Amino acid sequence: MKRLTLPLSDSDIKDLKAGETVLLSGTMLTGRDAAHKRLYELVEKEEKLPIDIKGELIYYVGPAPAKPGFAVGPAGPTSSYRMDKYAPTLLDLGLKGMIGKGARNQDVIDAIVRNGCVYFACVGGAAALIAKSIKKEEILCYEDLGTEAIRRYTVEDFPCIVAIDSYGNNAYTEGQKDYCRE
């Protein structure tokens, strides 16, 4: 298992291989469908984004309310395909990676390779366990979106898997080959 500190450097990303398990510590952004749509619309209008995404990692999550003693409630990954329309544009603007669950379309994979980025996957159904690695939460913008507001998380040993590495190797497709019968 590899331990990495956020933000990720280009060399950190280049060293990652699809299928590797990773523990991330540092800070990351969060956002889901509605927030991505707003960011995308601003880019289309050539307006300034309310946050700086350059060099950042974004976790596709809409956390539940926090219980006493926790920064957030259960915080499991959202299905990433819902951000596929917006991800290539954000990657081209400097976003370094994403965390979610599920496969990505070819446009996203091409943008990952083109920009030297990474896509991590988290295990769906492990929301309470994942929340234990989130130590602090700060709302950055779009508070009106509730759980879909863009936040900054401070994380420690946040568990994930390299789903698509910067070379386009894809754990979702490559991993299946080991189990297919010929």
Image (spheres, helix red, strand yellow):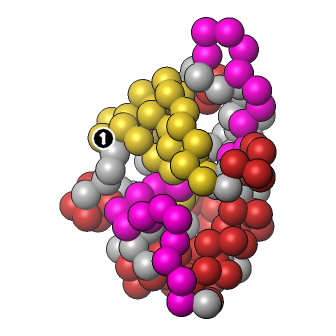
Instruction: Identify the residue shown where x is 38% and y is 35%.
Output: 25
Instruction: Identify the residue shown where x is 50% and y is 28%.
Output: 136
Q: Which amino acid type corresponds to the residue marked 1 in the rendered image?
A: Thr
Looking at the picture, tell me which residue is in the foreground, 131 or 113.
131
Quadrant in the rendering for residue 139:
top right
For the record, the magenta segment spans: 46-70
Looking at the picture, tell me which residue is in the foreground, 113 or 175.
113
Q: Is residue 165 placed above or below 100 in the rendered structure? A: below
Q: Mark 1: few, some, or many residues within 10 Å (few <14, many ≥20)?
A: some
Instruction: Identify the residue shown where x is 77% and y is 52%.
Output: 145
Quadrant in the rendering for residue 155:
top left
Res 151 visible? yes
Q: Is residue 34 left or right of residue 177?
A: right
Res 1 visible? no
- Residue 7: image location, x then y, percent: 32, 50
Asked if the stretch drawn in magenta spans residue 36, the answer is no
- Residue 89: image location, x then y, percent: 55, 82
Asked if the stretch drawn in magenta spans residue 51, the answer is yes
Instruction: Identify the residue shown where x is 72% and y is 36%.
Output: 63
- Residue 169: image location, x then y, percent: 48, 70
Report the residue marked by disc 1.
Answer: 5
- Residue 165: image location, x then y, percent: 44, 65
* Mark 1 element type: strand
Secondary structure predominantly adopted by residues drawn in magenta? loop
View extreme (top): residue: 69
Q: Is residue 10 left or right of residue 35?
A: left
Looking at the picture, tell me which residue is in the foreground, 138 or 168.
138
Q: Is residue 59 placed above or below 164 in the rendered structure? A: above
Q: Across the whole image, how many numbered discs are drawn on residues?
A: 1
